[in-house]
Amino acid sequence: MEWIEWVLSREFRQFVLDNDLFFPLLFLGRLIGVTAIEVWRPAREVSYRKVILNDLTVFVVYQFVIFPLAQQINRYIAIRPQLPETILAMPLLFRVLCYFVIADFGHYWIHRLMHTKHVWRIHKWHHAPTYMYWLAGTRATVPQQVIVNLPYIFAWSFLGLSPWWMGLAIGMFSSLQNDWMHVNVTWRSNWLEWLIVTPRYHHIHHSDNPAHYKANLAALFTLWDRLFGTYVNPDEVKEEELSFGIGENVPLVRLALGV
Ligand SMILES: [Zn+2]
Ligand SMILES: [Zn+2]
């Protein structure tokens, strides 16, 4: 069991950080772990063999082009408020909670904006797949990523003066959060929906049924949908009757550029 000791050692941690291997290793873990969950208890059939190459390509483009480009643009247009010392002196746990509530509230409204007539084109790509599993949810255009990042950058101010690993932890959380929302799994702990979004909850949002077009927009806390009238109770939707997609043929280049 020497390799376990090595993986848990300080040297290994330093090696991973020095070589920027944290997120590649995390992706490998997601690929194995999340796929295993889907194979174990799938909500519906997905022909992985047909879509995996396509979705891995999308992932690589997202990771190395779309996300970095959006971050560059965000350097010019994001608001980073300077918070008073009294807030920054609050316990870290409280500030992390503030981060998630504020960022998620902003994300809800940005998402709602993207489902309006004129902004829909920048978000269409995310809804384009006619199948649903964890890797199908990676699609985001540059303009979508830029505006979705805004509330997170704003709320990041609450995490000033936090430990060195906070950036990695938040990055890991948002990757897993996105995997979780889209994962193709039958999830029966529906009580969780009183607090957070579950896969079946978000799958309704991807439904091609016009009745669900603006349903369940929340990314983390379901409270926003309940408060602002976009909540559709997953218990009232037959999961097996859901189908996905945007119901129109748009050339891939237009989808990916959001034009
Ligand atoms: Zn959407
Ligand atoms: Zn989605």
Image: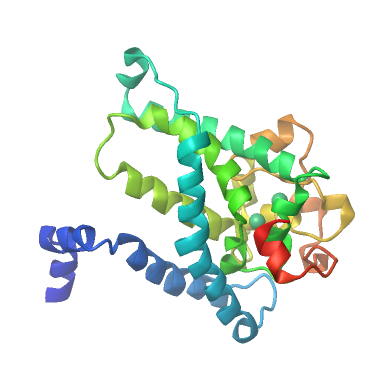
What residue is at 67 percent from the left and 34 percent from the top?
224
The number of numbered discs placed on residues in the rendered structure image is 0
| Closer-to-camera residue (34/114) | 114
Please give left or right for residue 38 compared with residue 13 in the image: right
The residue drawn where x is 40% and y is 28% is 157
Above or below, 141 relative to 96? below
* Residue at (18, 70) in percent of width and height: 4
Residue 236 spot, x, y in % from top left: 82, 52
Against 130, residue 50 (above or below) is below
In the rendered image, residue 15, in percent from the top left (x then y), is placed at 17, 63
Q: Position of residue 147 (x, y in %)?
A: 60, 42
Pick whichever, 191 or 129, lies toward us.
129
- Left or right of 144 on screen, residue 149: left
Residue 180 at least partly seen: yes
Residue that protrudes farthest toward the right in the picture? 210
| Residue 121 horizontal side relative to residue 20, left or right | right
Any part of residue 220 in sight: no
Q: Is residue 239 above or below residue 162?
A: below
Coordinates of residue 123 in the picture (x, y in percent): 70, 53
